[in-house]
């Protein structure tokens, strides 16, 4: 069964372009032209992924992202935001609210399709049964896609889970932002490294006191400390 992509875009020409290219890539599509319509359709028939324009009439894309991520029915649906070049604040806010990625306008349809495939592949990646990483009060179970910290379960998105997995696997070793982009997002270094910083900040916000184990190496990247903080 083909994955369905919900395209939220109010400009008719842009919507038509996206539908044509995404369906040509083997997906089915559903469209919405406003934030309210997007929320309604996502709840009615949760799609595999939402392509969400930030500039929408009425309820804007950031608010839509916030609503969807608060609703248990739609919280796990990956969102890719479509943004203008000068929407830096909105891009970062969207990522912090739970969006998986963003694409800056103008963009090529090929890039959009590649990003969709990458996010879906990451969310569907197979896990090794019984593969558990533990230490520093953190237990990460790949087979169940679960993380507990000091015995309490922490809900992470697929991207946050993969990011924490890599940092834990490579504890004590500095991971550059470019390396994390490649290993977590499957993207080249040409992508804005603010994506990494925002996801690390979001991951830390869910880790409580254990967030201190993720050390920032200024100007380079991050390291998971292999000693007691």
Image (cartoon, grey):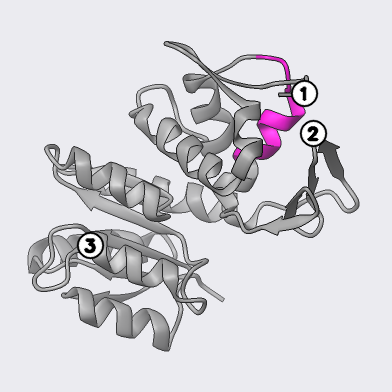
Question: Mark 1, residues whose alpha carbon is within 10 Å: few (<14), some, or many (≥20)?
Answer: few
- Counting from the top left corner in percent of width and height, residue 173 is at 69, 14
Q: Which residue is mark 2?
A: 136
| Residue at point 26%, 76% (across, down) | 31
Q: Quadrant of the N terminus?
A: bottom right
At 76% from the left edge and 29% from the top edge, which residue is drawn? 169
Where does the image place residue 6, in percent across and percent down from the top left?
A: 34, 71
Magenta stretch, main secondary structure, is helix
Give the magenta range.
163-173
Instruction: Tell me which label, 2 or 1, sits earlier in the chain.
Output: 2
Q: Residue furthest top?
A: 219
Q: In terms of depth relative to the viewer, which is nearer, 108 or 6? A: 6
Task: Quarter of the image for the C terminus: give it.
Answer: top right
Of discs 3 and 2, which sits in the foreground? 2
Q: Earlier in the sequence, mark 3 or mark 2?
A: 3
Q: Which residue is mark 1?
A: 228
Residue drawn at (43%, 70%) of the image: 70
Q: Are marks 1 and 3 in contact (CB under 8 Å)?
A: no
How far is mark 1 from mark 3, CA to CA? 41 Å
With 209 as the anchor, is 7 left or right in this view? left
Q: Is residue 171 left or right of residue 123?
A: right
Query: Do callouts 2 and 1 mark residues in contact (Cβ within 8 Å)?
Result: yes
Residue 61 shows which numbered tag? 3
Could you give the CA–CA distance between mark 3 and mark 2, rounded to whole angstroms? 38 Å
Residue 107 x/y as whole percent:
21, 42
């Amino acid at each position: 069964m083909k994955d369905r992509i919900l395209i939220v875009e109010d400009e008719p020409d842009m919507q038509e372009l996206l539908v044509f290219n995404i369906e040509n890539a083997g997906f089915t599509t559903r469209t919405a032209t406003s934030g309210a319509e997007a929320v309604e359709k996502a709840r009615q028939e949760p799609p595999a992924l939402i392509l969400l324009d930030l500039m929408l009439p009425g309820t804007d894309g950031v608010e839509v992202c916030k609503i969807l991520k608060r609703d248990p029915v739609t919280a796990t649906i990956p969102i890719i935001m479509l943004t203008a070049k000068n929407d830096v604040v909105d891009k970062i806010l969207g990522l912090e609210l739970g969006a998986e990625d963003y694409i800056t306008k103008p963009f090529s349809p090929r890039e959009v399709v590649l990003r969709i495939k990458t996010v879906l592949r990451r969310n569907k990646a197979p896990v090794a049964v019984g593969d558990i990483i533990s230490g520093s009060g953190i237990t990460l179970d790949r087979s169940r896609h679960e993380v507990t910290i000091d015995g309490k379960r922490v809900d992470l998105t697929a991207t946050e889970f993969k990011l924490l997995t890599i940092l834990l696997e490579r504890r004590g070793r500095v991971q550059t932002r470019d390396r994390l982009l490649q290993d977590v997002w499957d993207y080249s270094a040409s992508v804005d490294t603010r994506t990494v910083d925002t996801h690390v900040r979001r991951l830390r916000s869910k880790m409580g006191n254990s967030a201190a184990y993720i050390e920032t190496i200024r100007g380079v990247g991050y390291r998971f400390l292999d000693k007691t903080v």
